[in-house]
Amino acid sequence: MADTTSFDQIVVQSKGAAAAPKPVRERSRTKRAASMFAWAGLLAAGIAAIAPISHFTLQEAQTVILQHADDAGVTQALEQDWSHSNSPDYVETLAELAMQMPVVDTGSAYVAASRATELDASRAFAWAQLAYLEARRASGKVNQASLDALTRSMDACPLCDDEIIGWRFNFVLTNWASIPEPLRRKAFEQADVLRWIGPNAEFLADMRIKAQQNGIPFDAYRAAVNTPARTWDIGPAVQANTVKTTRPT
């Protein structure tokens, strides 16, 4: 820092003289301010760029925590305001867990599943859950809303997961009288793939018995299936699993 006495002398000597140029110190301060402003702008742009990534990471972390939460943790999550969540994974998980609570929370499950499908129309599990919940809300009767949700689930995931395919097949057989013919055939067509994937032989046998007990021509529908699955659609891992599960004991 400059000596105070010498600084005072400079000020006194400049009295009455022509206006002097801006002090060097003030010019450098202006440059520093401009530089800081530029860096602040770059920092803000960087934060804006990574904010969506950080938000996504936070949402994923919240979903993982929810998946491993106990009943108390799930209850706490359900009590929070999640109706405007932008994470389909989170609200779909919440919908599933709400149905697994000791006291089933169908209201929260319905709202959460609806939110999941609003955010991502390809959520086949959420659509299937809505098909069930719509029927439950209608005193156990399959209505148009339930059929629409079932159709959306079938369209979103025709053959992608054996669990959801099996659930929909069982739902159709259980509510056979309320299911339109196109959906009946589609359910059989999609369920045909269960013969090749996973340990589903016992499940299909149970469904056949269930159908016969309710007067449903299971074998006739099964024979009419023009299966969408072909040999070249069955990967090596699935073929190996098929050999293992169908080997005579």
Image (cartoon, rainbow, N blue to C red):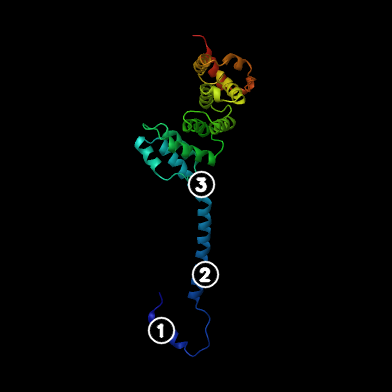
Q: Nearer the viewer, residue 87 or 214?
A: 214
- Classify mark 1: residues with Cα within 10 Å, few (<14), some (14-19) or many (20+): few
Viewer-nearest of discs 1 and 3: 3
Q: Are marks 2 and 3 in contact (CB under 8 Å)?
A: no
- At mark 3, the secondary structure is helix
Q: Which residue type carries mark 3?
A: Ile
- The quarter of the picture where the N terminus appears is bottom left
Q: Which residue type carries mark 2?
A: Lys
Q: Which residue type carries mark 1?
A: Asp
The residue indicated by pointer 1 is 8
On screen, residue 39 versus residue 98, left or right, reads right
From the top left corner, tell me how far across and down residue 179 is, in percent.
Answer: 57, 25
Q: Nearer the viewer, residue 39 or 130?
A: 130
Q: CA distance from mark 1 to mark 2?
A: 26 Å
Give whichever of discs 2 and 3 has the lower sequence position. Answer: 2
Viewer-nearest of discs 1 and 2: 2
Give whichever of discs 1 and 2 has the lower sequence position. Answer: 1
- Checking the image for residue 31, the label placed there is 2
Q: Residue at x 40, y 44 (%)?
A: 80
